[in-house]
Amino acid sequence: MAIDHETEMTDAEVDAFLARHETGVLSLARTDEPYAIPISYGYDGDDRLFYMRMVSTPESEKRTFLESDPGARLVVYDERESTYRSVIATGTLENIPPSELTPDQIAQYGDAKRPLFEIWAEGKRDLDIELYRLTPESVNGRRTEVDRAESA
C-alpha cells in the first residue's frame, strides 16, 4: 500500500467533515506530560468552535489535567475505502459555566453525545460533569488517497 495522492482539505471540506462526525481524540499537554482521551463533541461551523462535556471524578487524572489550563489538540479522522481524512484542531480549552451559555451553545452541547455513565465504576453522584469549549488557533484537514494494489 502506497500513498497515491495527499491534499489539504479546504475550509468548507473541513467544516463539512467535522459536522458529519461526532467523536475524536482530545490530547492535553502540560509541561512534559501528555494525556489523550476519546471524546464526543458538538461543532459550530459558523464560529469554528467545538463543544464537549467532560465527565470525571474529583481525584482523576483527567480532572488534574483539565484544571492545569493545558494546551489542547483535537483529532478527528476516518477511513473510507482508499481515502483517509483527518482534521486537527489546536487551541485553548475553556471551562464554560452553565449560567453563561447561550441557547445556541446549549444546542451545540446537545450535539455532543452524552457519556455512558454505566461505564464508570463510581456512582453517578461521584462524577463531575463540566462543559468545555475548544477555541482553535488552527484547524487543518488532510485527505490521503492510497493505492491498495499489491505490487509484485
Image (cartoon, rainbow, N blue to C red):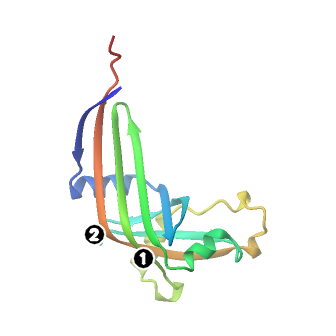
Q: Quadrant of the C terminus?
A: top left
Q: Which residue is mark 1?
A: 105
Image location (x, y in percent) of residue 24? 47, 55
Image location (x, y in percent) of residue 71? 44, 72
The reply, left or right, for residue 41 in relation to residue 125 is: left
The reply, left or right, for residue 150 in relation to residue 57 is: left
User: How far apart in space, not on screen, are marks 2 and 1 (Cα)?
Assistant: 12 Å
Q: Secondary structure at mark 2?
A: loop
Q: Quadrant of the N terminus?
A: top left
Image location (x, y in percent) of residue 84? 35, 40
* Residue furthest top as drawn: 152
Q: Secondary structure at mark 1?
A: helix
The kind of residue on which mark 1 rests is: Gln
The kind of residue on which mark 2 rests is: Asp
* Mark 2, other Cα within 10 Å: few <14 / some 14–19 / many ≥20: few
Tell me which residue sits at (33%, 19%) in the image. 149
- Image quadrant in which you'd find residue 134: bottom left
Residue 139, placed above or below residue 100: above
Tell me which residue sits at (51%, 60%) in the image. 40
* Residue furthest bottom as drawn: 99
Badge 2 or badge 1: first in the primary sequence? 2
Q: Choose between 91 and 46: the one closer to the eye.
A: 91
Q: Choose between 142 and 124: the one closer to the eye.
A: 142
Residue 60, placed above or below residue 36: below
* Mark 1, other Cα within 10 Å: few <14 / some 14–19 / many ≥20: some
Residue 146, placed above or below residue 141: above
Residue 46, label in figure: 2
Tell me which residue sits at (46%, 88%) in the image. 100
- Image quadrant in which you'd find residue 10: bottom left
Residue 36, placed above or below residue 126: above
Image location (x, y in percent) of residue 141? 29, 53
- Image quadrant in which you'd find residue 125: bottom right
